[in-house]
């Protein structure tokens, strides 16, 4: 077996000496943590060639007590009169008041736990704080108030920042209740500079309804015990909003921002959710067992995460404040 050995003549060694010396200096400087000497030639770091253009994500984790929102279904005067004649005015009055009730109330004592927001903030923070290389943001900050979020944005002047706030409530639909959570996303490009631009988006998550009547809270107490059906629903909502948030920010930070990128449309869904605002040509962002994400053109700047299936037959897209 023959071995071929490349010989380096003295003249060749002299020609390669500057290159060898430079490589030696660069290697020693790297090992010592020193800057490269002036004139040293080397490939630029990958970060210098491709700076991280992803925004910093600022989450406002300000736990608020979960309230129950009443949607009024008032009886007509004729129906109210018939009810009073049938069961008596004394018995009919609370029913009439109940059906007409609007606004917010604290959860009944039988539905409360030691955690005012039923663990939503903790579950969301845990889901987003997991180190993953594929997050569409380069850093995560979790602050406790809007004022702290404003301070964080001020520290990131000139950078892209996504600020996200949340709202959660339990909706009263008479015979059922439905947990709803909303994320408000504000993307700031070149924050705090004359070139700053802002894009706002909303992500609305509606859970499967739970059989429960606010007027007979103790009868349904088991659903609201710690670790019970409501807490499981809250945890699932936090995970779903975290995933939807990642998808939304990824699409808003591309060269051609467009949240409504989809492989198919609402009208093509085999199993459609209840969605009065959805049209057949609306974009479907994500479809999975029991849930679908839709971007209704009727609700500009909103993504709806809706339950599907035989037990998801409740009104599914009431907007906050409506």
Image (cartoon, rainbow, N blue to C red):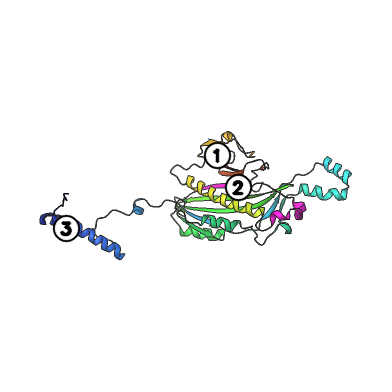
User: Does dot 3 land on a helix, a strand or a loop?
Assistant: helix
The answer to which of marks 2 and 1 sits earlier in the sequence is 2
The answer to which of marks 1 and 3 sits earlier in the sequence is 3
Residue 268 at x, y percent in the picture: 57, 34
Question: Which portion, as a residue range, is magenta?
Answer: 196-225
- Residue under pointer 2: 205
- Residue under pointer 3: 17
Residue 218 lies within the magenta run:
yes
Residue drawn where x is 65% and y is 46% of the image: 208
**Does residue 34 show up?**
no
Residue 11 at x, y percent in the picture: 10, 55
Residue drawn where x is 58% and y is 56% of the image: 123
Circle nearer the viewer, 2 or 3: 3
- Residue under pointer 1: 284
User: Does dot 2 land on a helix, a strand or a loop?
Assistant: strand
User: CA separation, marks 2 and 1?
Assistant: 15 Å
Residue 64 at x, y percent in the picture: 63, 58
């Amino acid at each position: 077996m023959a071995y071929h050995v490349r010989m380096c003549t003295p003249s060749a060694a002299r020609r390669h000496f500057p290159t060898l010396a430079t490589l030696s200096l660069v290697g020693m400087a790297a090992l010592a943590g020193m800057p490269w000497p002036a004139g040293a030639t080397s490939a630029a770091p990958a970060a210098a060639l491709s700076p991280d253009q992803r925004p910093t994500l600022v989450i406002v984790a300000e736990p608020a007590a979960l309230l129950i929102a009443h949607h009024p279904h008032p009886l007509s005067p004729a129906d109210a009169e018939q009810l009073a004649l049938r069961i008596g005015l004394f018995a009919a009055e609370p029913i009439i008041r109940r059906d007409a009730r609007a606004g917010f109330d604290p959860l009944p004592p039988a539905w409360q736990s030691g955690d005012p927001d039923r663990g939503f903030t903790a579950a969301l923070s845990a889901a987003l704080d997991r180190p993953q290389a594929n997050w569409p943001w380069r850093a995560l900050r979790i602050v406790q108030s809007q004022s702290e979020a404003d301070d964080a944005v001020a520290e990131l002047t000139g950078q892209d920042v996504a600020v996200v706030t949340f709202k959660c409530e339990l909706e009263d639909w008479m015979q059922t209740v439905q947990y709803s959570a909303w994320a408000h996303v504000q993307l700031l490009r070149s924050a705090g500079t004359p070139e700053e631009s802002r894009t706002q988006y909303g992500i609305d998550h509606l859970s499967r309804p739970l059989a429960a009547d606010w007027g007979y809270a103790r009868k349904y107490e088991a659903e609201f015990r710690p670790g019970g059906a409501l807490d499981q629903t809250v945890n699932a909502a936090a995970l779903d909003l975290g995933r939807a948030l990642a998808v939304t920010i990824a699409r808003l930070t591309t060269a051609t921002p467009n949240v409504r990128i989809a492989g198919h449309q609402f009208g093509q869904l085999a199993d459609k959710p209840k969605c009065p605002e959805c049209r057949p040509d609306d974009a479907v962002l994500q479809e999975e067992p029991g849930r679908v994400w839709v971007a209704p053109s009727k609700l500009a700047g909103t993504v709806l995460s809706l339950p599907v299936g035989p037990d998801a037959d409740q009104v599914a897209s009431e907007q906050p404040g409506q």
